[in-house]
Amino acid sequence: MITAIYPGTFDPITNGHIDIAVRSARLFHKVVIGVFDFPKKDLLFSLEERVALAREAVEQHKNISVEPYTELTVDFARKCGAQVLVRGLRVSGDFEFEFAMAMMNKRLDPELEMVCLMASPNFQFLSSSILKEVARLNGDISDFVPDHIARALMDKHYPGLRRQ
Ligand code: ADP
């Protein structure tokens, strides 16, 4: 039985992230999306909100679960009994960062294998930060996130107002 973790900030989870999780779930028996509590960046959603939004996004996939974590990613992987760490690679700049992280994780836990999946063409230029910027300016984000996440973004930025 092979378990993979897919760690990240997921602030919020996007269709690009979901695509990676669903494709991983075809390769591995179990995928645990790990939502990291304390990233070094400004957050729009709390940990509880990010976990709840991600859970709703993957609820129909029986072998994908979502768990918060606060520790080192390699320790979270061990806690989940995972042999694989999945990350998504977009064309623009992810490689250098992922490579450095992979080297460090390998030092910290030589048993954990990292698998990178290439982002699908439709989501190559999608990031949570660009998405949040478009949502903040009341742009249409319906192609990039599930409906419940578009609603959650609207509610953050424009409480009481709903796009028709
Ligand atoms: P982090 O803060 O760790 O970069 P993110 O939540 O932003 O976490 O992303 C988690 C993982 O998903 C990273 O490997 C990132 O490269 C990948 N990812 C982000 N957006 C996309 C996308 N549109 N398509 C595929 N992978 C993506």
Image (cartoon, grey):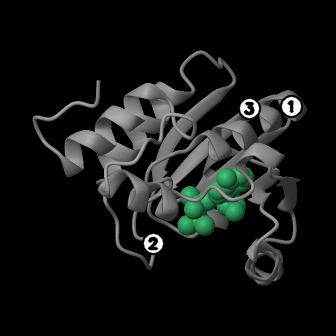
The residue carrying mark 3 is 22
Give the spatial CA distance, label 1 vs label 2: 30 Å
State the residue at coordinates (63%, 55%).
126
State the residue at coordinates (61%, 51%).
79
Whether residue 152 is visible to the viewer of this picture, yes or no, is yes
Task: Tell me the element at label 3.
Answer: helix
Q: Give the residue at the far left of this rendering.
A: 160
Mark 2 close to ligand 1, CB under 8 Å: yes
Whether residue 120 is visible to the viewer of this picture, yes or no, is no
Q: Position of 94 compared to 11: left or right?
A: right
153 to 134, vertically: above or below: above
For the N terminus, give its image quadrant. top right
Q: Amino acid at mark 1?
A: Met
The residue carrying mark 2 is 39
149 to 128, vertically: above or below: above
Residue 34 percent coordinates (x, y): 56, 50
* Snapshot quadrant of residue 76: bottom right
Mark 1 close to ligand 1, CB under 8 Å: no
143 to 79, vertically: above or below: above
Give the spatial CA distance, label 1 vs label 3: 17 Å
Residue 68 percent coordinates (x, y): 45, 49
Graded by Cα atoms within 10 Å as few (under 14), some (14 to 19) or many (20 or more), the crowding at tag 2 reads few
Mark 3 close to ligand 1, CB under 8 Å: no
Residue 19 percent coordinates (x, y): 72, 37
